Amino acid sequence: MSTVLIWAGVAVAALSAIRLVLTRDLFARLHFIGPVTVLTAPLVVAGLALRTWSSWHDVFKLVLIGLLLIGTGPATVVATARARRGPDD
């Protein structure tokens, strides 16, 4: 089960990266960064936490990293879009 979750996260990241490279518009590119932080982080963190070698200490660190990625990823995308758009728009 953990391997499936990890590979699902990798697939989301790879598809988002391919779409990101193929897109020319900056705001559309920012749109394709969102799934990486919102979907990939929880999938990979859950997969790694379910591995048999994971101790409670490892799981705690993984969950903390996942929460930080989920919490700051969308905010970073919005801040980048607002900075690029400028105060006049």
Image (cartoon, rainbow, N blue to C red):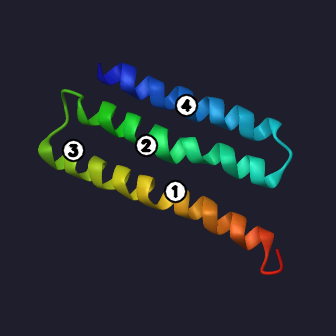
Please tell me which residue lies in front, 71 or 49.
Answer: 71
In whole angstroms, how far apart are the C-alphas of marks 4 and 1?
A: 15 Å
Q: Is residue 55 left or right of residue 2?
A: left
Q: Which mark is residue 59?
A: 3
In whole angstroms, how far apart are the C-alphas of marks 3 and 4?
A: 22 Å
Occupied quadrant, residue 88? bottom right
Check contact, mark 3 vs mark 4: CB within 8 A. Answer: no
Local packing at callout 1 (Cα closer than 10 Å; few below 14, some 14-19, many 20+) is: some
- Residue tagged by mark 1? 73
Q: Could you say where residue 20 lies in the image, as x and y percent from the top left?
A: 73, 40
Check contact, mark 1 vs mark 2: CB within 8 A. Answer: yes
Q: Which mark is residue 52?
A: none
At x 63%, y 47%, the residue is 33
In whole angstroms, how far apart are the C-alphas of marks 1 and 3?
A: 21 Å
- Residue tagged by mark 2? 41
Q: Earlier in the sequence, mark 3 or mark 4?
A: 4
In whole angstroms, how far apart are the C-alphas of marks 1 and 2?
A: 10 Å
Please tell me which residue lies in front, 69 or 83.
Answer: 83
At x 54%, y 26%, the residue is 11
SS under mark 2: helix
Where does the N terminus fall, quadrant-wise? top left
Please tell me how many numbered marks the rendered image carries: 4
Q: Earlier in the sequence, mark 1 or mark 3?
A: 3
Q: Could you say where residue 48 lies in the image, as x and y percent from the top left?
A: 31, 34
Occupied quadrant, residue 21? top right
